[in-house]
Amino acid sequence: MRKSWKETFQTVRIALLLAVMMTCGMTFAGRGLIRAEAAQSNVYRVHVETGYLALRTARAYDYSNEIGKLYTGDTVQVTDYSDGGYWYVYAPGLGRYGYVNNEYLEEVPDTSTVSIAGVPMEVRVEKNYLALRSGKSFEYENEIGKMYTGETVYVVDMSDPTYWTVYSPKLGMTGYTNQNYLFPLQSAYVTYNEMWVHVDSGYLALRSAKAYDASNEIGKLYNDDTVYVEDTGDPQYWWVYSPTLGMEGYVNKDYLYGGSYYTYSLGTWTVKVDTGYLALRTARAYDASNEIGKLYTGDIVNVIDTSDPVYWYVYSPSLDLYGYVNSEYLY
């Protein structure tokens, strides 16, 4: 059974939520990314006389909705100020999002606004609505909001195979929803030709060169593995990216089937280097031999895969190439 776009990227973790309201000075910038441009910092410090400040799943003082404990001196990044009592925040120390009582937050002076990024997706249902839920299950009792076709939500967590955590700007709420009704924003994403491997036995070799040679094998692909075709210029060996292996290489096209155009990106990011250039590479390593392009300050890239803590897989429109870059130089 072939893998869907969403199944392929179930392991992707979204590092930060993208959901600050326009009233707080937030502006849309680039494709698939919102950046904070407000003069006022969104970084706040917790201050409680005793005990802790609870991080909650809802705007209410209820023991059952506590998901974390914040102590005096901890910092949070506010992403939604719309409620008078409870603000929606990201807590870096906990690695979680939730609501906190804003009476116990103090603005951190002289701190730059933290850019908050996420994955925008579009709701599409054939009829009625898509429920936003307080739990990862299909139950009438856990419905907390209704989302309709055409509305945009921001995906916070894709780890569950069915129910993803999303933020709805229209509702001003965070909850769970069935991911089968979420689709990429076509204007915000890089397009791929997604295909699948089919071999009668054994495996399909991913190769470093356009030739059948045991010495150029760099990976093994099996039935129904997904690849993204990036270059079909050769009549026999196509250049592909394998999300399973996290590698690029050549494969014999005779063992590929299907062919559906899908889109995926974690947003548009900008290169910034103090001097010189940022190398686009064929591998996740600092090595002169794997450089395939040069990116300069101000160049734009579309981020495809952030699973590695240092080297992200990107597409460069200016070079018309895919490759790895050091994420420390993207903002």
Image: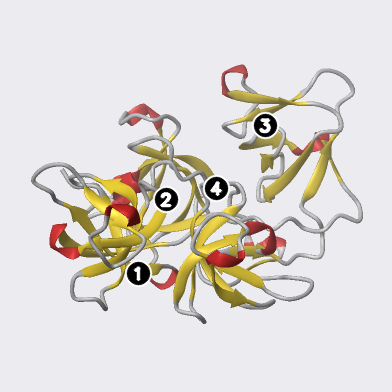
Decide: few, some or many residues near mark 2? Use Cα within 10 Å; few <14, some 14-19, many ≥20: some
Compared with 257, 222 (above or below) is: above
Percent position (x, y) of residue 295? 61, 75
Which residue is label 3 attached to?
A: 94
Which residue is label 4 attached to?
A: 308
Relative placement, left or right, of 296 versus 107 is left
Q: How far apart are marks 1 and 2 (CA)?
A: 18 Å
Compared with 51, 79 (above or below) is: below
Q: At 40% across and 69% down in the image, what residue appears?
A: 190
Decide: few, some or many residues near mark 4? Use Cα within 10 Å; few <14, some 14-19, many ≥20: few
Which residue is label 2 attached to?
A: 246
The residue type indicated by label 1 comes to Thr
- Contact (Cβ within 8 Å) of mark 1 with mark 3: no
Q: In which quadrant of the rendered image does the N terminus lie?
A: top left
Percent position (x, y) of residue 129? 30, 49
| Residue 124 seen | no
- Contact (Cβ within 8 Å) of mark 4 with mark 2: yes
Q: Nearer the viewer, residue 222 or 140?
A: 222
Q: Earlier in the sequence, mark 1 or mark 4?
A: 1
Q: How far apart are marks 1 and 3 (CA)?
A: 35 Å
Q: Distance between the residues labelled 1 and 4?
A: 22 Å
Q: What colour scheme does the image use?
A: secondary structure
- In this view, the mark in front (1 or 3): 1
Q: At 72% across and 67% down in the image, what residue appears?
A: 37
Point out which mark residue 191 bears.
1
Q: Earlier in the sequence, mark 4 or mark 3?
A: 3
Q: How far apart are marks 4 and 2 (CA)?
A: 9 Å
Question: Which quadrant of the view contains residue 279?
Answer: bottom right
Q: How many marks?
A: 4
Question: Which quadrant of the view contains residue 232?
Answer: bottom left
